[in-house]
Image (cartoon, helix red, strand yellow):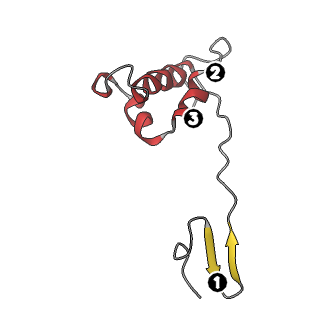
Amino acid sequence: MRHAGTGAPGTLTGVSGSTTLPQRQVATMPAKSKAQQKAAGAALSAKRGETDKKDLKGASTGMVDSMTEKELHDLASTDRKALPDKKQK
């Protein structure tokens, strides 16, 4: 049996042949708080090159490298009216 990743990208090769894996589906993620929504907006701006990464502070510094532009857009576009200022623990 071959190990995963030895065939074509997106396939597993085994005794019975290869199997195609489903594409990764990214669900829309609404922001949980105003702070998270603002951080996502700042990270999105930096990812698009509208602001410098060095100007980011707090959670947005990690978001810019670990999330896709679509994921950041989904978080940043959440309506802030009903959101708490900070996430409840």
Q: Nearer the viewer, mark 2 or mark 1?
A: 1
Residue at left 57%, top 35%?
71
Q: Amino acid at mark 3?
A: Glu
Q: Earlier in the sequence, mark 2 or mark 1?
A: 1
Q: Nearer the viewer, mark 1 or mark 3?
A: 1
Q: Quadrant of the C terminus?
A: top right
Q: Residues within 10 Å of mark 1 (few under 14, many from 20)?
A: few
Q: Earlier in the sequence, mark 1 or mark 3?
A: 1
Secondary structure of the residue carrying tag 1 is strand
Q: Quadrant of the N terminus?
A: bottom right
Q: Amino acid at mark 2?
A: Thr
Q: How many numbered tags mark residues here?
A: 3
Q: Nearer the viewer, mark 3 or mark 2?
A: 3
Q: Amino acid at mark 1?
A: Gly
Residue at left 65%, top 43%?
26
Residue at left 56%, top 23%?
76
Q: Earlier in the sequence, mark 3 or mark 2?
A: 3
Residue placed most toward the observer, 44 or 20:
20
**The furthest residue to the left:** 54
Q: Is residue 45 above or below residue 4?
A: above
Residue where numbered disc 1 is placed: 14
Residue where numbered disc 2 is placed: 78
Q: CA distance from mark 1 to mark 3?
A: 34 Å
Q: Is residue 11 above or below residue 85?
A: below
Q: Is residue 3 above or below residue 66?
A: below
Q: Looking at the rendering, which quadrant does residue 75 occupy?
A: top right
Q: Looking at the rendering, which quadrant does residue 86 occupy?
A: top right
Q: Which mark is residue 71?
A: 3
Q: Which mark is residue 36?
A: none
Residue 28 point in image, percent of width and height: 67, 35
